[in-house]
Image (cartoon, rainbow, N blue to C red):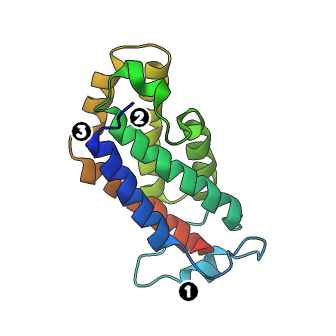
Amino acid sequence: MRLPRHLLAALFVISGVLVACGSDKPAASGSGATVAQASSHTSGAAPTQPPAAGGNVDCAALKDAMASMLVNWQVVIGLSNTPTSEWAQVPIGTISKFGDQLAAITAALGSDADAAATLSFMSGANDIVKRGLGGDAAAQADLTTYMGTDISASIGKQLPISLAFSNAGCS
């Protein structure tokens, strides 16, 4: 199966984002980092609301979920331009786990209003993808309408989640 150019471009972008977001510093996992500590790490960004998990975030688990979710996010963007009949054969990502990844990240960062709104938006896209994987031929058109045609806007929606991640002390 040949991947569409837009999907390859999106994967290239996400690879760059993952490399750029990588850190040589150990994660704050297990350190009991609180939002107060996290807010001292922000660089001029407005502080976010405390994480839903009572102020403590398992940064290592969240980082893993974020990495997988970001790959699947790119796959979902590409599915708008891929016939529904080919969705199950996409060899990239773990699209069947996308909903679980979104739920895990929402549990950790969902108290940040901007991150919660973005995660909710992508949960709506995931619902359409599940329909398509279940054989609904209209899912491609529905996903295209839902996501819009501006790929950069869909990719840009990841920013509030990244900011909430950083503000939770997981940068």
| Residue named by callout 1 | 40
Q: Residues within 10 Å of mark 3 (few under 14, many from 20)?
A: few
Residue 36 position, x and y percent, is 62, 80
112 vs 94, nearest the viewer: 94
* Left or right: residue 24 compared with residue 124: right
Residue 74 position, x and y percent, is 40, 46
Amino acid type, label 1 = Ser
Amino acid type, label 2 = Ala
Q: Is residue 134 visible?
A: yes
Quadrant where the N terminus sits is top left
Q: Residue furthest right?
A: 30
The disc at residue 125 is 2
| Residue named by callout 3 | 148
Give the SS element for disc 2: helix
| Residue 147 vertical placement versus 151 (above, below) | above
How many numbered marks, from 0 up? 3
Residue 101 position, x and y percent, is 59, 45
At 56% across and 37% down in the image, what residue appears? Answer: 99
Give the SS element for disc 3: loop
At 34% across and 43% down in the image, what residue appears? Answer: 7
Q: Quadrant of residue 23?
A: bottom right
